[in-house]
Structure formats: C-alpha cells, structure tokens
Amino acid sequence: MKKRLHQPISFLVLVHLICFFGVGVSAQAILGSQNCKSISPGSSFKVIAATDSLLDRSVKDYIIAAFQSEGMRSHPKPMLRILYRTEIEQIQISSSKTGTVEAQGKSWAGNEIFVHLWRSNSDSVLGGERGERAYQTLATYLRLVVEVSETNDLSCVWRGRAIANLKGWRKRDLLRQMIPPLIKKFGGTVTREDIVLR
C-alpha cells in the first residue's frame, strides 16, 4: 500500500520540479559597446569593482570567468585593468504612435554613444511597441557598465554596457545573465543589440 502511495507523490514532485525549472521569467536586455583600440590576444587582466557594494562584489567572479572564456588570463601584474559597476535607476517609460525621443546623456568622458539604450523610435524595452496609445509609467532598470583600459596609462581599450528591466528578477541573477553576452562583444563596437535573458 505504501509503495502505491509513493508513486503518485513522486510523480507530483517531478511535475512540480519541471514546472519550476522549465518555466522562468524572461527579460529583454539591450547591449552596446565601443572598441577604442586593438590589443594582443590572450592579454592579462585584473578585474576591479568600482564600488564595494554587496551586489558588485557578488558578480566579480562571473566577470573574471567571462573574460577568461575569451582567451584572456587573470594576473596580479596585468596589462589591462577591467573596471565594472552596476547602477539601478528608475526610468519613466513612454510610448506613442510617433515613438519616443532618444535621450541624450554624458558618459565615456563626455561622449555619448549609447543613446539607443535609453530611448528608441522602434519597438524596444524602453519605448514599447510602436502604434500604441501614449502612456507613461515608472520602471526599475539594472545597468552594467564595463570599462577596459591599459594599466600603464589607463587609456581606453573597450567599453560595454547592458541594461534590462528588473521586473521579476533578483539583481544578482539578472547580472549573471547579462555578463556573458556583453563580454562576448569585447573587441568590437556594437551600437545596439537586443537579447532575451532567461
């Protein structure tokens, strides 16, 4: 009798696990990067968190692993310094039939190259779908910024940025999903790329 009871219970547990791991919250992220100069393959690096926040420190190993997967090596006396930071910001989202106006801001020593990360006249995370009625709402976004520079003079080598809506995600989990696709852009310039995180 006990054996018969265990069978349906085991089946229900299995179904629950499949539903839990198989169905997750997805998020759309926007990536952008700027390559400043070419470097030799397999360069050594050291990763530094811009702040001592728990969130920044919690993903440092993932940043290191992502650059190692690109053929680079961590070293105490590196050729490259990799500085990263996370930012949380509440953004007023709006959508209308005419699309939204791109925001202008300052970054990368005053040169703004990521205007498309904030507003877009096409379908996007921030702008919504074209043709919808105009509306405004406040949403919380998580942004990851990575800056690679030469250790000796701190001249720019590469810069990358990713942003995604935090809705339904824990901050650390969302960062872990954003890191690999962003670092894969290392060495290249990408004005904008939309990806889906799961």
Image (cartoon, grey):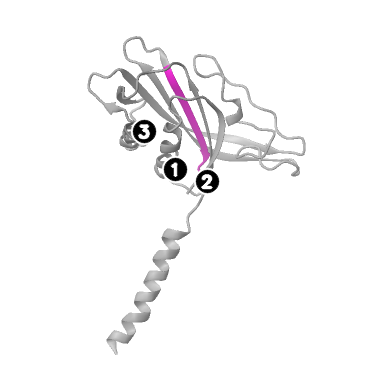
Is residue 147 within the magenta segment?
no
Would you call the spot at circle 1 few (<14 residues within 10 Å), some (14-19), or many (20 or more)?
many
Give the total of numbered labels. Answer: 3
Q: For the residue marked with disc 3, what is the amino acid? A: Asp
Q: Amino acid at mark 1?
A: Leu
Q: Earlier in the sequence, mark 1 or mark 2?
A: 2
Q: Is residue 117 shown left or right of residue 10?
A: right
Q: Position of residue 131 (x, y in %)?
A: 76, 42
Query: In the picture shown, does residue 18 fall above or below 84?
Result: below
* Left or right of 118, for residue 41: left
Mark 2 near mark 3, Cβ–Cβ under 8 Å?
Answer: no
Q: Earlier in the sequence, mark 1 or mark 3?
A: 3
> How far separated are the C-alphas under marks 2 and 3?
20 Å
Q: What is the three-letter code of the residue carrying label 2?
A: Ala
Q: Which residue is mark 2?
A: 27
For the residues bearing labels 1 and 2, Cβ distance under 8 angstroms: yes
For disc 3, the marked residue is 56
Q: Quadrant of residue 64?
A: top left
Which stretch did the figure color magenta? 157-166
- Asked if 55 appears above or below 46 in the picture, the reply is below
Q: Which residue is mark 1?
A: 174
Nearest the eye: 5 or 36: 36
